[in-house]
Image: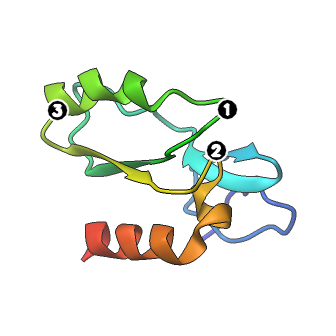
Amino acid sequence: MSGTAGGPASSPVPTGLRWRSCAGYSTIPARKAPTSDSRTPTLLVFGDHPRFTDPAASVGLVAANEHLRSTTIEHAGDLPQLEQADETAAVVDGFLI
């Protein structure tokens, strides 16, 4: 596996998959944004008080596509994976299993 990671330390990612970086940490795959025609299971994770993202923007996408899911992490802003790491990990694990 090889590719480009957006974090401060490079980590292996599948060939052709680049990651968008926010504050130096890898976040959303940049290959294709989730759209109403995507068939890839996708979990959108938001904090409950973000400053730079709008969780409401995902409502239409999720309603239009059975493969998209959205969740909100309490007591987190734009980086729930850092601000509430254990809760975010549990949500992602539940989605993947």
Residue at image x 16%, y 25%? Answer: 64
Q: Residue furthest right?
A: 8
Residue 4, given in percent of the width and then of the height, sits at 72, 55
Q: CA distance from mark 2 to mark 3?
A: 24 Å
Q: Name the residue carrying label 3.
A: 65
Give residue 63's mark. Answer: none
Q: Name the residue carrying label 1.
A: 51
Q: Nearer the viewer, residue 9 or 51?
A: 51
**Mark 3 secondary-structure assignment:** loop
Mark in the foreground, 3 or 1: 1
Q: Please report contact status of discs 2 and 3: CB closer than 8 Å, yes or no.
A: no
Q: Please report contact status of discs 3 and 1: CB closer than 8 Å, yes or no.
A: no
Residue at image x 32%, y 26%? Answer: 35
Q: Name the residue carrying label 2.
A: 78
Residue 23, given in percent of the width and then of the height, sits at 81, 48
Q: Amino acid at mark 2?
A: Asp
Q: Horizontally, is 21 left or right of 84 in the view?
A: right
Q: Amino acid at mark 3?
A: Asn
Q: Please report contact status of discs 2 and 1: CB closer than 8 Å, yes or no.
A: yes
